[in-house]
Image (cartoon, helix red, strand yellow):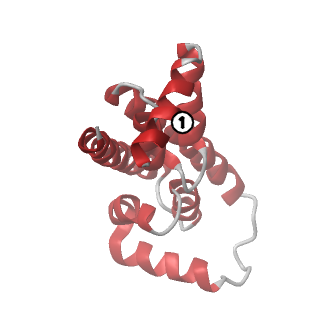
Amino acid sequence: MMDSIVQGLQDFTASLPEWLQWAGIVIAGAIPFVESYLGSVIGVLAGLPLPIAIAMAVIGNLVTMLLVVLGAGAVRSRVARDKPESARRRKLRERFDRFGVAGVSLLGQTILPSQITSAAMVSFGASRHAVIAWQTVSIILWGVAFGLLAHYGVTMID
């Protein structure tokens, strides 16, 4: 059953122009909670070559993360800091204080999208450059890991 679903997706994808196939994965990677890890899986399942699926999903995720980090930096300077923290934000701040930018970037995607964790870290006062650098590493690692898992999973189904 699963192989017929994958085959149907691949047939549909193959009927589209190549640029549209790639653009679809970039858009998927840009969506919070889909990001590079599920975007690369979608690309692999759709029949794109593994490096293209991963690269397009990573690009989409990186673009939105960069927009959020740069926007959060601008907003941070304008927003009053004396607003009470929500329970979720307080929990994220505790993890940030404990693990730092690198830890939150690498592990944060298991809890929240990179866009949300990036904005939160900048709002906590983290360097935008450090957040961008570590989020880039994280987005690439997660995209590659899930892309490889999907690739070898599809290979096992065939």
Residue 85 x %, y %: 66, 82
Q: Residue at x 49, y 42 (%)?
A: 5
81 above or below 15? Answer: below
Q: Residue at x 61, y 47 (%)?
A: 31
- Classify residue 90 by image quadrant: bottom right
38 above or below 158? Answer: below
For disc 1, the marked residue is 60
- Residue 22 in sight: no
User: As drawn, is 75 to the left or to the right of 58?
Assistant: right
- Residue 3 in sight: yes
Residue 42 x %, y %: 47, 41
Residue 115 x %, y %: 56, 54
Quadrant in which the C terminus is drawn: top left
User: As drawn, is 156 to the left or to the right of 13?
Assistant: left
Residue placed most toward the observer, 158 or 27: 158
- Classify residue 140 by image quadrant: top left
Residue 78 x %, y %: 75, 59
Q: Residue at x 43, y 38 (%)?
A: 45
Q: Residue at x 59, y 30 (%)?
A: 24
- Classify residue 119 by image quadrant: bottom right
User: As drawn, is 74 to the left or to the right of 89?
Assistant: right
Residue placed most toward the observer, 63 or 41: 41
Crowd band around label 1 with a 10 angstrom C-alpha radius: few (<14), some (14–19), many (20+): many
Instruction: Please name the amino acid that badge 1 sits on.
Output: Gly
Instruction: Say what secondary structure mark 1 lies in.
Output: helix
